[in-house]
Image: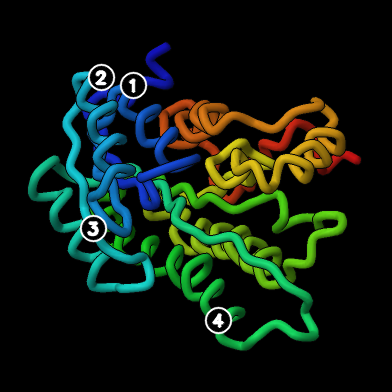
Amino acid sequence: MDLFDLQGEIALVTGAGSGIGQAIAIGLAEAGADIGCFGHSSGSGLDETAKRIRATGRKVITIEGSVTSADDIATAVERIESELGPLTIAVNNAGIGAGGAAETLARENWQHVYDVNVTGVFLSCQAEARVMLPRGKGSIINIASMSGSIVNRDLKQANYNSSKAAVIHLSKSLAMEWVDRGVRVNSISPGYTLTPMNRRPEVADQVKIFERDTPMGRLAAPEEMIGPAVFLASRASSFVTGIDLVVDGGFVCW
C-alpha cells in the first residue's frame, strides 16, 4: 500500500549494528528508504547491516560514533544530509541493558545507563529535529521498552526501567513541543525479544521464564519490530504523535 511506502525517504538508525536496530534499518530499506546506520564502530555488525541494505537496492552509509556525544550525532546528521539527502526519519534505538540491587548500585553504573539511554536519545532527537523542523517534516521514533511501563518480575533493574520510562515521557514531551511544526515523535516499547543477548547459552533458563510469562508464549523476533517502525515512519501514521506503541505479545496485560 502507498501509505506504507518509504520511497524517497532518508532515515537515520542508531544502534544499527545488531538486534532490533539492525532489523529496523533493513526493514526501512525494504520499504524504500535510504539509510544512515550509526553505531560504535563500522565493524562486522554495521557492515553486515549495510550489506543487507545494499541487497535491497537502497543506498546506505555507516557512521561511527556514540550517542552520548552531541558532536558525533551532529556529524552523523550532516553526513546523511550530504551523502543521502534531507533526513526525514530517525529511529533512536541505541541503548544498553543494566541491572543490580538498588541499595548497592554504584553511582557510575546508574549514570552510565542514563547517559546512553536518556541523554543519548535526547541528543539524537535534538540533532535530528534541528534539520527536520525548518523543513516542517519528519518522524522521530524512540525505542523504549515495556520496562518503562511495568516492573519486570524478579529482575532488579531500577536504573534500566526508569531510564526507559524517561524515554517514553521524553518522546511525549517532544511530540507536544513540535506538534505544530511538522515533526512527529513516538516511541516503541518492545517486550522480551530474541536479540543476541537473549541467545546466549547462559541465559537459556531465564529465556524460558520470559517465554512462560508472555501471553503469546514466546519472545519476539527482532524483525517483528519492523512493522511498527514502518507504520510510525510512514504516512500511515500521519495523525499519530506522542504515543508509546507497546509490542510485547500481551505481556503488560497480565
Q: CA distance from mark 1 to mark 2?
A: 6 Å
Q: Describe the element under mark 1 as helix, strand or loop.
A: helix
| Mark 1 vs mark 4: in front | 4
| Mark 3 vs mark 2: in front | 3
Number of marks drawn: 4
The residue under label 3 is which amino acid type?
Glu
Residue plotted at (56% across, 40% down): 195
User: Of residues 70 and 199, which is closer to you in this image?
Assistant: 199
Q: Are marks 1 and 4 in contact (CB under 8 Å)?
A: no
Q: Are marks 1 and 2 in contact (CB under 8 Å)?
A: yes
Q: CA distance from mark 3 to mark 2?
A: 22 Å
Q: CA distance from mark 4 to mark 2?
A: 39 Å
The residue under label 4 is which amino acid type?
Gln
Whole-percent x, y for residue 25 in the image: 36, 36
Residue 181 lies, with reference to residue 203, above or below; the image says: below
Dot 3 corresponds to which residue?
64
Dot 4 corresponds to which residue?
111
Dot 2 corresponds to which residue?
56
Identify the residue at the far front of this view.
Answer: 201
Residue 145 lies, with reference to residue 167, above or below; the image says: above
Whole-percent x, y for residue 190 in the image: 64, 42
Q: Earlier in the sequence, mark 1 or mark 3?
A: 1
